[in-house]
Amino acid sequence: MEKIRIIGSHNLRLKGQVRISGAKNAVLPAIAATILTDEKVHLENVPLVKDVFTILTLMKELGADCHINRNSIFIRTKNICSDEASYELVRAMRASILVLGPLLARHGKAIVALPGGCAIGSRPIDLHIHGLEKLGASIKLEHGYINASAKKLHGAEIEFEKKTVGGTENLIMAASLTKGETILKNCSLEPEVTNLCELLIKMGAKIDGVGQETIRIKGVEELGRATHQIIPDRIEAGTFLIAGALTQGDITLTHIQPHHLDTLIEKLRYSGARIENLNPTTLRILGSEDIKPQDITTSPYPGFPTDMQAQFTVLMTQADGTSIITETIFDRRFSHINELLRLGANIEVSGDKAIVKGKSPLSGAEIIASDLRASASLILAGLIANGETTINDVEHLDRGYEKIEEKLKSLGAQIERLQG
Ligand code: EPZ
């Protein structure tokens, strides 16, 4: 098990420029979408993170030809010969469920392991299944697998009971090759869903209402080749913005789309940070000495992102006063808090709320990461904790952050990766 060691300090001031990578949560559905065509698809600005390699392993197991060249991927699924996504791979990355809709639409059959829960919650997929059944799929859940088949899918009107990013993406992909018109209501508005629609339209899909809650898809006979740019990772960008606010730093983030971060930027400005738009793809953050407490409630985009909750909680441990963090998306997304308490934070969890009392000076300790975004929050805390912090099980971190130590080191952090 690899570890990360940080020599942190209350006086750390991160300064410099960091280039943000492509979005993990945009490239995963884009890779799944390549199942919908026989032609070659070229994806650019791909983050080289563990989840990308996991889904490429799955695609190769299905029979796809995949090639990586620096941050570009070339995929052709003409020779797909299997419709089964094994438990081993789905367990490693629940987003493997995103091959379900494309396999059904393209091959009329899919056997995908049930993803099960994870450190942040139960993670059901009932909304994916109900939607696909409305398109005419027959789906059986047996022996821990989703056994789906569809002689002929047909257009339908589907309203999601609650916003689901993966469910919206699975249904858009399946409907793109389904004869007739499909109307999806209460769709997720995340930029990653929009980026997927843009790719599908380049491949020839007929999609109206991109970026809106109601999306209309007219199924086509076949989809073709495309070259597509993956959007910047707004969660990585948000993580570095918080690093700047936390260390009274001066950090410039390049290759981003600032409007994807509006809610976080507003909260950071209210907490005292100065954030400037230097140009359409660059932000500069100047952290302030006095951090004002802010209450946040996570909600679907464009609300405060659940994937930024743990990182923002760390910032609030340094605020002058009490902040209330309410997590409404996942039922177990406070696992970072016990570890933050070990560093000296003063946080009390009650139901879906974490009451954060600041300002608590943190001191280094040995801690353990439990999931991707919790890992990022522990790194942020280690940066400002006086002394040495060692974070165990950093495999979680590698799932979604490309070269994070190098990026932080270039800003002045004392951080290194140790073999376990
Ligand atoms: C996506 O997960 C992201 N992952 C998550 O990011 C992100 O936290 C989440 O959306 C935010 O909603 C990827 O895009 C790969 P959901 P997803 O379906 O699609 C419930 C990260 O750190 N639900 O939007 O799995 C579910 O339990 C990851 O990068 C059902 O009840 O999330 C949750 O409470 C973590 N039934 C809520 O909806 C379903 O069929 C939102 O889940 C599906 C979901």
Image (cartoon, helix red, strand yellow):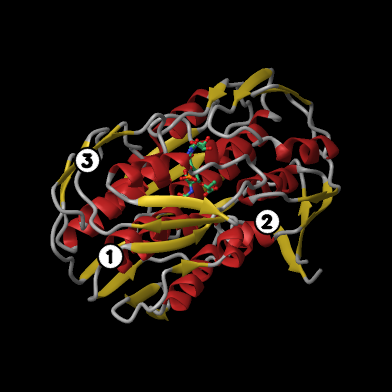
Residue type at mark 1? Arg
Front of the two marks 1 and 2: 1
Image spot of residue 316 (x, y percent): 65, 28
Furthest residue toward top: 321
| Left or right placement of residue 400 versus residue 334 in this view | left
Tell me the quarter of the picture where residue 361 sits: top right
Q: Are marks 2 and 3 in contact (CB under 8 Å)?
A: no
Indicate which disc, 3 or 1, sits on the residue closer to the N terminus: 1
Q: Is residue 89 left or right of residue 419?
A: left
Q: Closer to the camera, 277 or 305?
A: 305
Residue 74 lies, in percent from the top left, at: 33, 77
On the image, the x and y values in percent for residue 85 come to: 49, 66
* Position of residue 111 measured from the top left corner of the image (x, y, whole percent): 46, 62
The residue pinned by badge 3 equals 156
Mark pair 3, 1: CA separation: 18 Å
Is 199 in front, or is 86? Answer: 86
Q: CA distance from mark 1 to mark 2?
A: 48 Å
Find disc 1 in the rendering and name its residue: 106
Q: Which mark is residue 413?
A: 2
